Image (cartoon, rainbow, N blue to C red):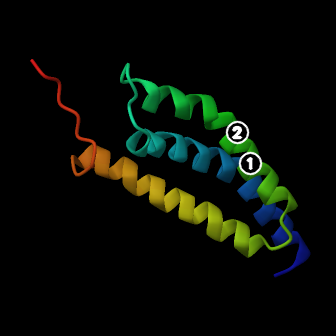
Amino acid sequence: MGARARTWGRVMLAGPGAIIVAVVTMAGMTRWIPGGAAGIDNVVLPLVLAPLIWASLFFYACLDSKLSRVAIVTGALLLVHGALVAAAFTGNGTHSRQVAR
């Protein structure tokens, strides 16, 4: 891989890649963070942590010497949390919450 391709790969992972993975991770976190006493901690905490997730992914993509390792880590985060989001939409999630009437 040439220097130009590595640069563009790093730019794509640090820019739009970090944003997309941070949003999917934020959505997936609502499935594994407990609800808390008020029942909203699993929604609030990912919203508060979203900038930290994005910044971590951005700096990791910019500073790591191996671009393949960055792609593997961000791809794994995307796949795991994407599967959690998909499970929530299909009704196969572990936290199927039903309102008691």
Residue at point 38%, 19% (across, down):
38
Residue 55 position within the rendered picture, expressed as x and y whole percent measured from the top left = 75, 43
Number of marks = 2
Answer with left or right where residue 16 lies relative to residue 9. Answer: left
Looking at the rendered structure, which numbered label has been put on residue 56? 1
The relative height of residue 41 versus residue 1 in the rendered view (above or below) is above
Answer with left or right where residue 101 lies relative to residue 98. Answer: left
Q: Is residue 11 visible?
A: no
Q: Nearer the viewer, residue 50 or 16?
A: 50
Q: Residues within 10 Å of mark 1 (few under 14, many from 20)?
A: some
Q: Are marks 2 and 1 in contact (CB under 8 Å)?
A: yes
Residue at point 30%, 45% (across, down):
88
Residue at point 48%, 61% (across, down):
79
Q: Farthest bottom residue?
A: 1
The relative height of residue 74 versus residue 100 in the rendered view (above or below) is below
Find the distance from the CA under tag 2 to the CA under tag 1. 6 Å
Residue 40 position within the rendered picture, expressed as x and y whole percent measured from the top left = 41, 23
Indicate the quadrant containing the N terminus: top left, top right, bottom left or bottom right.
Answer: bottom right
Looking at the rendered structure, which numbered label has been put on residue 52? 2
Q: Farthest front residue?
A: 37
Residue 35 position within the rendered picture, expressed as x and y whole percent measured from the top left = 38, 31
Looking at the rendered structure, which numbered label has been put on residue 3? none
Residue at point 63%, 70% (across, down):
72
Q: Quadrant of residue 101?
A: top left
The relative height of residue 80 versus residue 20 in the rendered view (above or below) is below
Q: Nearer the viewer, residue 81 or 36?
A: 36
Answer with left or right where residue 81 lies relative to residue 9. Answer: left
Q: Nearer the viewer, residue 51 or 97?
A: 97
The relative height of residue 37 versus residue 81 in the rendered view (above or below) is above
